[in-house]
Image (tube, rainbow, N blue to C red):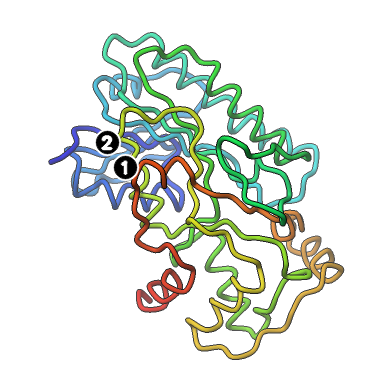
Amino acid sequence: MKYGKIILAGGNGYLGGVLSKYFGSMADEVIILARKPQAEKGNIKTLVWDGKTIGDWTHSFSGANLVVNLCGKNVNCRYTEKNKKEIFESRLIPTQLLGKVIEEMINPPKLWINITSATIYRHSEDHSQDEFTGEIGEGFSVEVCKAWEKSFFETNTPNTRKIALRMGIVLGLADGAFPRLLNLVKLGMGGKQGNGEQYVSWIHEEDAAGSIEWLLNHPEIKGVVNCTAPEAIENHVFMRSIRKAFGRNFGLPAPAWLLAIGARIIGTETELILKSRRVKPVVLLDSGFVFRYGKIDEAMAALSQAR
């Protein structure tokens, strides 16, 4: 085995499943911290925690190669005051807790990655936003990201390297945003959304997992890292690529006014669709990481064949 112990805090969701499967064949054990117990699957086991208080789970952190923090209420909801509070607390409280535990350890994890979001950058159609020159945006989701990263980097963990991984939309068939977009396409509603000019920063799930392993093996990298495919693409190109890969010639467009009505009905915010995220992963590219799916049509072809 290449690795001893990998820990996925809040790892019972979609991305946690991708990472546990990926690292399951490479590590002696993969430990998922979750609110509900799960049966062991080979070398993948679940420890119960509430994300708020110290418990027996802390013993598992000793000597870990990697901790990935995936905690956070889904932002795919209406931004009511109650939801806003839950979105903040579900990110900040576990992050501060992990920092406290790691800070006091004699043999702490080598690397701690917090999965944050590429939405921290401003609405950008003019040029790419990278880790060095990118401009931070405004609005609720940006404030969440800023507070989250601040609480992460404020924790004092001198013997544990830290990376805030600003992730784009992860593309996979099991869950996340992609199956919902694919359903629209299958229903004939997979045209451009809004004016279709807004950029989408995406990454295939295999590259998301692969990039995390890459960072584990490159101790010189720390701080902020963008985790997106090399080229963001416009929404109309993105939707066309899904239609092409899944054999749909036609897709009704959804103008902004219609999206606003639809978002209200299904309980989400149009910002998640209409904000232009044009993000470039300069740190990964400069360090030599090779994307398996660097082009959107390659990623879509792989997803369509994996069904």
Question: Given the current orientation, which residue lies at the most extreme left position?
Answer: 1
Q: Is residue 274 above or below residue 153?
A: below
What residue does disc 1 label? 214
Quadrant of residue 192 within the rendered picture: bottom right
Question: Given the current orientation, which residue lies at the most extreme right position?
Answer: 257
266 relative to 98 in the view: left or right: right
Viewer-proximal residue, 109 or 275?
275
The residue located at (77%, 39%) in the rendering is 138
What residue does disc 2 label? 217
201 relative to 172 in the view: left or right: right
The residue located at (63%, 84%) in the rendering is 187
| SS at mark 2 in the image | loop
Q: From the top left corner, tell me how far across and down residue 44 is, in percent.
A: 25, 43
- The residue carrying pointer 1 sits among few (fewer than 14), some (14 to 19) or many (20 or more) residues within 10 Å by Cα, namely some
Tell me how many marks there are: 2
**Amino acid type shown at disc 2:** Asn
Q: From the top left corner, tell me how far across and down residue 179 is, in percent.
A: 53, 68
* Marks 1 and 2, how far apart at CA: 5 Å
Image quadrant occupied by the N terminus = top left
Q: From the top left corner, tell me how far across and down residue 16 is, in percent.
A: 40, 47
Question: Given the current orientation, which residue lies at the most extreme bottom position?
Answer: 249
Viewer-proximal residue, 130 or 85?
130
- The residue carrying pointer 2 sits among few (fewer than 14), some (14 to 19) or many (20 or more) residues within 10 Å by Cα, namely few
230 relative to 125 in the view: left or right: left
Q: From the top left corner, tell me how far across and down residue 88 is, in percent.
A: 66, 32
Viewer-proximal residue, 298 or 130?
130
Q: Are marks 1 and 2 in contact (CB under 8 Å)?
A: yes
128 relative to 296 in the view: left or right: right
The residue located at (38%, 8%) in the rendering is 104
**Amino acid type shown at disc 1:** Trp
Viewer-proximal residue, 250 or 186?
250
